[in-house]
Structure formats: C-alpha cells, structure tokens
Image (tube, grey):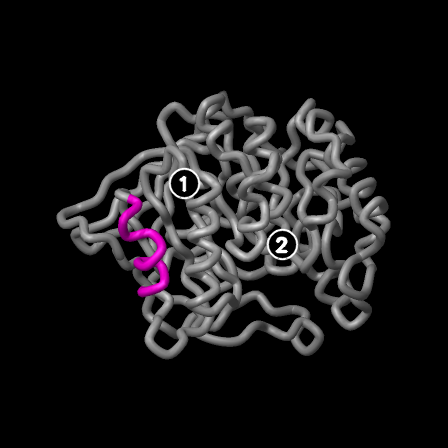
Amino acid sequence: MIRYPPPLAPGDVIGVASPSAGVAARHARRLDVAVRHLADRGFDVRLGPLVHGDGVASGSADARAAELTDLLTDPAVRAVVPPWGGEIALDLLDRLDWDALAADPTWFVGYSDISTLLLPLTLRTGVATLHGQNLMATPFRVPAPMLPWLDVVRAEPGATLVQGAAARYRSSGFTDFAVDPEATEEPLDAPGGWTRLDDGDGDLRVTGRLVGGCLETVAHLAGTPYGDVGAFVAAHAPEGTIVYLEAAAADATDVVRRLLGLRYAGFFAGANAVLLGRTRGADVPGLTQHEAARHALADLGVPVLADVDCGHVPPHLALVNGALATVEHGGGRSVLTQVLR
C-alpha cells in the first residue's frame, strides 16, 4: 500500500533543504523570487541552514543529512523542496533514518540529483514522493497539459491527475538566474511529442506504479538496498511498475551502459512500460539517443516511449513515485493519468 502525505493547505510550512547543492550569492535574488512565489500562494517558507551554500555541496554529508531530516520530520513542515539538484546526494543514503522519515509522511519534491533520495524513500517505505520542479524553477509558468508541483501537493488522497505531452519544449540552454532572477517564462521553441521505440503497433494503454528518476544518479542505486525495485513490487505494486528515466547529459553510449546496468540489477522487474525523458545528451557517431534506448531495451518485452517531458528539458511532468499511473499513446494523443491511491 502506498502512503501519500496529507495535502497542503494555505498557511502550511514548506521547508527548503539543500541535500546536494546550495545557492551561491550570485543566485540569491532568484531564491528570494522563488520564496516569494510560495508566500504569494499562502505558504510559509522555512529555509534550512545550508541553503546559502557554495561549492559542490552545501555542507558536509552529516550536516546535509541533519538538515533534511529536521525538515522532513518536523510535524509543522508539510513539504520539503530543494533549491535545485547537484552532484553528490548519493553520500546521504547511509546517513538517513528512512523509517523516521516515513513515520509522518511529508511531501518531498525535486528532480535531478534529488531523485537519488526521492526514489529510495518510496522504494524502501512505500511513501509517495514527487519528481517535479525544484524550487528555483517553481516561478516558471507550467503550460497545459502539465501540472505544477504545487497543484499535486494540494491534491486530496484518491485524486486523479491528468497530464499529457507538451506541445512545445525548450530546445537549448537554461535561464541564467544571475542575469534574470525574475524569469517566469521558459522559451518553448520546438515542437513536442512522445516517440514509441519498441516494435508494438496500434494504440498503447498500460498501467503500473510510477518509479524512476535521473538516469545518471538512479543507475548508482540499482543492486543496492536503496534501489530494490523487486522488493517494492512485492510489497507495494502487485500491478507492476511504469519506470521513467531521464538522462541529464549522458551521451548515447553512456545511456546504453547505464540502462543495461539497470537491467542486470533487476531494476525493470515487474515493469509494464518504460518512459524515457527527452534529453540534450549527445548522439555519437553511429548511435543516436533513440538507438541507444533500443539497443538496451528493445528485447525487454514492454512498450518503450522516448521524448517524454520529464527532467532536464523543460517543461516537466509532475510524476508521483508510487502513484497508480496509466499511459495512453496513439491516435495523435499522449496522456499520463495518475491516481493517488
């Protein structure tokens, strides 16, 4: 059984932790804008002590684990969101008391390196987590048929959330928050749409519980106690899973290696479909990103969709790890429905 944190209401506290990278001085104005965005929507915001951190990580592993634990276990805090991802959240995994984090579930939101923590929390405890925008991206308008993470964390238990393929996406670059801290619009300049990579024909409709995250970080969880999808399926997902993965920057050969490593570690155990996020990772001579996915997954025996709107290429689907999801693709439409039960 999946447990969902209570929905947020006006006046609730949203905590900001930096379990990976902190916010350097040059981006402080954007942090203020993002905090104001939450406050304007009726929430109180509590910044952790490491938020204004510089360097590869915001602090020592012990300090980052303590900051995250303090916010996720504080009964007054109803959601925790990092400013953004980073590089080495992996070093927190053996420093966290997972049972304590799950005792009174709190919405934990983020993507990129934060998926290194979101996914283990769901796999180990059955508590839903949210792969969505990080705090610094929260002021960006989220175009239909996407949902901003704030809509998801305010949804009631049992709610049905319907999203779909983006009409357009951002083909290159990222907003420099040091130059434009007030930015609220992503330049969505390229036509969107999901791509089916397996050999199946006809319209697709498949259901399972969502699990996944950033390929470059999740690949390090497979085969460890923090990435045991088989145990999660046995305990919480008799319906099977829909696995979503997105490469932040890995080139096509690296994607092949990482996907195969996940296969060998049993990460696709119980998978009913695989969703691969749109990526700016490079093709290499003789191997495109789509060909890389086919090379690694074509004989998995399940549908594979690529160019799905999750991860490092805006805009972003809000994906609830643990939610019962149905993917429909075909006939000119691509729809993802999540039920919070």
User: Left of 296 or right of it: where is 51?
Assistant: right
Name the residue tied to disc 2. Answer: 113
Image location (x, y in percent) of residue 150: 56, 45
Name the residue tied to disc 1. Answer: 268
Viewer-closest of 173 and 219:
219
User: Residue 289 got which mark?
Assistant: none
Q: Secondary structure at mark 2?
A: helix
Q: Amino acid at mark 1?
A: Phe
Is residue 298 a member of the stretch shown in magenta?
Answer: yes
In the current view of this chain or complex, which residue is farthest to the left?
Answer: 202
Mark sitting earlier along the chain (2/1): 2
Nearer the camera: disc 2 or disc 1: 1
* Chief secondary structure of the magenta portion: helix
Image location (x, y in percent) of residue 298: 28, 52
Above or below 57: residue 48: above
Image location (x, y in percent) of residue 25: 82, 69
Q: Secondary structure at mark 1?
A: loop
The magenta segment is 291-300
Q: Amino acid at mark 2?
A: Asp
Crowd around label 1: few <14 · some 14–19 · many ≥20 (10 Å): many
